[in-house]
Image (spheres, rainbow, N blue to C red):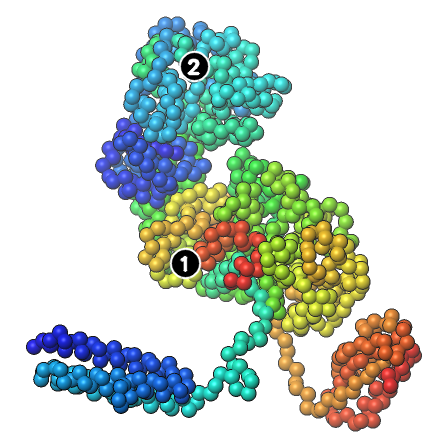
């Protein structure tokens, strides 16, 4: 809302520097955007929050200044002279959609002479950045910027049957608006019609056919109230925004309608001549009067933390236009004015008193009681995951939750159906809520490749969104995903290091899995015991190609909750062993089809209670080994907790291991 | 008594000589360099000190005394510097010895980098944690009740406009603010409450250097008997002092949010700056919000505040384009 300094001086004395005025207004709720000198006047741009439509006119701003600087404000009381036949003999108004138009008033002026506005009027509109058009149109704009109530002037003889019908549009109706554009009006939109056709989009813009022109002599002045939701819908649907629709989208002062109409007529008579016909065609309902509010003064200190004394409270509220209607001394009763629809409750009055009294009076050195807040396991695990992964050379990424179709694939092959998606015109492509973080990280890798940073290694901790038809909300589990140029085992090592960091490696195993994103045979499910931790694999070449990635890479995605729940954040001390370890190495020749995991499992079971650990060393194929055989080389560590093991005892365990492997896997010792 | 110009100039030359000599000895990295410096400054025949000594003859008696004293001091200083260099020199070895070059770069282990947004978020969690605020979480896909109804945003409120929100089917939406978490926390626990909610929020803004359709918020909530706006101001001032430095001021400007009343914008001014910077919104929890979660507004009061993490992060690190935060270029991430 731009206000003119000179215009404000019509209503009250302004003798302070403009900086002092704007600073005080900003600290009381009208944020100062800018001040500009426009030909000797000052255009002050103030930001008006949506709860304060009363400040969308100079009168409202003047009232605020009056309260803040404690000085009287003088409001015009328009009583334009009338003569001739009553207005209701010249026109009629019919409201067919009372829910969208609670009130419509019309006044009639005949014999106006259209021409340019006088200098003072043009000057004031120009200060606001509004282009002057002609005296009658300028006056309707002027009064809107004076009191916040939009008005419209129709060329009365051009209205079919010289009447107004406020109704919803009929199918197929169109309107050429005063901006010369044609709008197709849909049936839920409110229009102002004459006896035949729409002549205006109610509250948004008037029609070209019936607008005031140079030949106009008789005008009908509209001042009405419309449903704010309906105005906003129409305005947005048509992409048509005006100073009028901006105001009608907010709850305007219901009492201002008639005042604005009289004020408009008064100024038209002054600037364009003519005769105002007596009476007003006033159709619709009056709004119910305002409900009184009891204000327990003790609530001020309960909410604000400071006391404000009763005389100051009374001064502020009365200056704002509330009437003091008795009540107990410590709980006076106030009735808010019609222009402050935002004041309905005690708490609303507390805010008024606080902002006018000034928030600078509220202290900032209170002793807030101490309380504990420990870091939750979630916070601790998140921090440690991040620290561990950056220590392993991987960067952290933050990517968008909304992705295009080709990035909306799940990692879990069992996750069927369509992703959850948003319905918004600005997100026609990236409309899906992702089901895996991996595609987003592949996109990051691609972006880096394209910008000269090959092999971006990245991880992200974020949610995925899984549709669950029978539950109120989609499942939104947190995942940890890693993408890297390392190969399968390189990335698996990262996962194992992470698990080791949380002492969660004990029941870790993998199981081959078919994951569409990954290369067959280089893809596995990650398990902790029987619970699924996630998936790992080398990204399939077809996926790389589809996402325009040049370099091979691997990816893993882990369920954060399982990691968190398995993490041992406070490990218990284990006594250091007092007896020595006995180490043996074995090379067993086994079928090539035998997985290390299977062999290691059998070795562990056969090794007895003194087998402390098994360490894979390497695999040998070829040489003098048959085609279908391989040699697996591994180390064994034996230890007894209470005594030193003898060589014979260890030999016995090793023999048992070899026998078992020989029976189960046709294993032979490599010579 | 004032010295003649030529005497003053001679004294200045002595100062200059001392400075040059001391630094030459300090920088001499091996015995050859130390010897070269010795010849230049302390050489018996043509050393610069010797030359300076000869200048004594051209001065008058008064100047001679002053100059002489200064000369002796410079001589002592240079000799001490030579001794220092010599004792150091005995420890200096050649950079390359036995074919090993100690100046070669180390084998640098590759280190990853924390994203600046999560660094900022962690710092905020840490600061508010010290004030007793625990972290609370809530779903990003929310229902209309938690995003609007319970936050005292009436059905006709412009904030619900489909153009300004990401609606899904079935009365769901992507949360437009982390205030939804307030509601979920209060629905599930009786007062007192002291939590911060942190996370992603979504609004269909056109993406440019300062706007993103997804961004991060941190929101604080404190509810108890006797919580006032003075407590709010105190907590935010302590936060500002902790995050930005002691030399920081805050102020409240009236604003409008449906879920707080009174509502304020919080501005901060620091390091003697001349411009207040808007940091976020705050206010006292609206009685209707308390009623929606089954708290009695005559029993408890509370405050809430919300800050944009991107804004804090960008301001802290001097990042001028929000899009950099989501592109995740290595060249960007490696700077943090």
Residue A457, image x, y percentages: 63, 62
Name the residue rendered at 75%, 57% in the picture. Answer: A540
Name the residue rendered at 43%, 45% in the picture. Answer: B263
Q: Which residue was labeled with disc 1?
A: B240
Q: Nearer the viewer, residue A324 or A71?
A: A71
Q: Nearer the viewer, residue A529 or B94?
A: B94
Q: Residue furthest front?
A: B45
Q: Residue furthest left?
A: B1
Q: Secondary structure at mark 2?
A: loop
Residue A221, image x, y percentages: 42, 16
Taking B91 as reference, is A192 left or right?
A: right
Residue B312, image x, y percentages: 46, 55
Neighbourhood count class around disc 1 (C-alpha, 10 Å): few under 14, some 14–19, many 20 upward: many
Chain letter belonging to callout 2: A
Q: Which residue was labeled with disc 2?
A: A212
Q: Secondary structure at mark 1?
A: helix
Name the residue rendered at 42%, 54% in the picture. Answer: B232
């Amino acid at each position: 809302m731009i206000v003119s300094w000179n215009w404000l001086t019509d209503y009250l004395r302004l003798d302070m520097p403009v900086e002092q005025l704007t600073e005080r207004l900003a600290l009381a709720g009208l944020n100062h955007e800018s001040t500009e000198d426009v030909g000797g006047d000052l255009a002050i741009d103030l930001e008006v929050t949506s709860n304060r439509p009363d400040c969308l006119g100079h009168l409202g701003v003047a009232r605020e200044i009056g309260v803040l600087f404690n000085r009287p404000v003088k409001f015009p009381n328009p009583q334009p002279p009338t003569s001739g036949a009553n207005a209701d003999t010249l026109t009629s108004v019919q409201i067919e959609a009372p829910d969208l138009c609670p009130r419509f008033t019309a006044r009639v002026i005949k014999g106006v002479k259209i021409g340019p506005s006088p200098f003072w009027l043009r000057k004031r509109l120009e200060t606001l950045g509004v282009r002057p058009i002609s005296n009658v149109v300028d006056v309707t704009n002027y009064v809107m910027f004076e009191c916040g109530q939009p008005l419209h002037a129709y060329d009365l003889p051009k209205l079919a049957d010289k009447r107004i019908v406020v109704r919803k549009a009929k199918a197929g109706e169109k309107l050429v608006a005063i901006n010369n554009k044609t709008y197709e009006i849909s049936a839920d939109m409110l229009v102002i019609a004459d006896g035949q056709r729409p002549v205006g989009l109610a509250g948004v813009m008037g029609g070209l056919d019936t607008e005031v022109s140079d030949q106009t002599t008789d005008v009908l002045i509209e001042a009405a109230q419309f449903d704010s939701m309906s105005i906003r819908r129409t305005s947005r649907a048509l992409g048509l925004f005006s100073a009028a629709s901006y105001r009608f989208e907010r709850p305007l002062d219901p009492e201002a309608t008639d005042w604005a109409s009289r004020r408009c007529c008064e100024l038209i008579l002054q600037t364009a001549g003519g005769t105002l016909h007596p009476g007003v065609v006033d159709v619709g309902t009056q709004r119910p009067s305002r409900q009184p509010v009891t204000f327990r003064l003790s609530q001020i200190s309960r909410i604000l933390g400071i006391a404000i004394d009763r005389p100051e409270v009374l001064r502020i509220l009365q200056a704002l236009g509330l009437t003091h209607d008795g009540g107990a001394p410590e709980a006076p009763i106030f009735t808010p004015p019609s222009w402050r629809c935002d004041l309905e409750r005690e708490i609303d009055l507390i805010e008024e008193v606080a902002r006018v009294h000034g928030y600078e009076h509220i202290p900032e050195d209170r002793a807030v009681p101490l309380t504990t807040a420990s870091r939750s396991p979630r916070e601790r695990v998140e921090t440690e995951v991040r620290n561990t992964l950056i220590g392993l050379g991987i960067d952290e990424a933050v990517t968008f939750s909304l992705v295009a179709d080709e990035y909306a694939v799940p990692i879990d092959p069992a996750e069927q159906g369509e992703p959850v998606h948003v319905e918004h015109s600005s997100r026609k492509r990236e409309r899906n809520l992702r089901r895996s973080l991996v595609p987003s990280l592949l996109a990051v890798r691609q972006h880096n490749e394209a910008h000269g940073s090959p092999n971006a290694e990245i991880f992200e901790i974020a949610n995925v969104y899984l549709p669950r038809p029978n539950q109120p909300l989609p499942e939104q589990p947190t995942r940890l995903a890693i993408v890297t140029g390392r190969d399968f085992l390189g990335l698996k090592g990262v996962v194992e290091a992470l698990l080791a960091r949380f002492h969660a490696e004990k029941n870790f195993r993998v199981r081959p899995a078919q994951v569409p994103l990954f290369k067959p045979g280089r893809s596995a499910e990650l398990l902790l015991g029987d619970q699924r931790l996630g998936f790992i694999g080398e990204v399939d070449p077809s996926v790389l190609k589809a996402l325009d990635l040049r370099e091979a890479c691997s990816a893993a995605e882990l369920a954060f909750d399982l990691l968190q729940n398995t993490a041992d954040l406070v490990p218990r001390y284990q006594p250091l062993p007092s007896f020595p370890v006995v180490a043996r190495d074995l090379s067993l020749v086994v079928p090539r089809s035998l997985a290390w995991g299977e062999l290691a499992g059998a070795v562990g079971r056969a090794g007895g209670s003194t087998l402390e650990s098994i360490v894979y060393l390497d695999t040998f194929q070829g040489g003098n080994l048959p085609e279908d055989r391989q040699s697996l080389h591994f180390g064994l560590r034996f230890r007894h907790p209470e005594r030193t093991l003898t060589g014979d005892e260890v030999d016995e365990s090793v023999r048992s291991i070899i026998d078992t492997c020989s029976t189960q896997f046709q294993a032979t010792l490599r010579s | 008594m004032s010295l003649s110009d030529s005497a003053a100039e001679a004294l200045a030359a002595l100062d200059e000589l001392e400075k040059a000599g001391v630094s030459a000895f300090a920088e001499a990295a091996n015995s050859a360099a130390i010897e070269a410096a010795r010849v230049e400054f302390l050489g018996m025949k043509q050393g610069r000190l010797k030359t300076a000594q000869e200048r004594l003859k051209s001065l008058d008696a008064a100047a001679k005394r002053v100059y002489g004293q200064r000369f002796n001091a410079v001589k002592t200083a240079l000799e001490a510097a030579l001794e220092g260099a010599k004792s150091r020199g005995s420890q200096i070895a050649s950079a390359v010895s036995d074919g090993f070059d100690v100046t070669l770069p180390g084998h640098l282990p590759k280190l990853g980098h924390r994203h600046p947004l999560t660094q900022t978020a962690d710092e905020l969690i840490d600061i508010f944690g010290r004030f007793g605020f625990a972290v609370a979480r809530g779903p990003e896909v929310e229902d209309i009740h938690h995003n609007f109804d319970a936050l005292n945003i009436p059905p006709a409120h412009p904030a619900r406009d489909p153009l300004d929100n990401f609606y899904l089917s079935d009365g769901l939406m992507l949360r437009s603010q982390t205030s939804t978490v307030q509601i979920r926390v209060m629905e599930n626990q009786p007062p007192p409450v002291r939590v911060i909610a942190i996370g992603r929020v979504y609004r269909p803004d056109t993406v440019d250097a300062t706007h993103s359709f997804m961004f991060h918020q941190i929101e604080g909530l404190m509810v108890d008997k006797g919580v006032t706006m003075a407590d709010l101001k105190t907590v935010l001032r302590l936060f500002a002092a902790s995050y930005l430095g002691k030399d920081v001021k805050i102020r409240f400007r009236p604003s409008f949010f449906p879920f707080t009343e009174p509502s304020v914008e919080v501005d901060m001014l620091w390091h003697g700056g001349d411009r207040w910077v808007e940091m976020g919104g705050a206010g006292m929890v609206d009685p209707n919000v308390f009623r929606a979660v089954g708290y009695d507004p005559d029993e408890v009061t509370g405050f809430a505040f919300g800050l944009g993490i991107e804004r804090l992060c960008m301001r802290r690190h001097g990042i001028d384009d929000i899009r950099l935060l989501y592109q995740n270029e290595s060249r960007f991430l490696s700077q943090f």
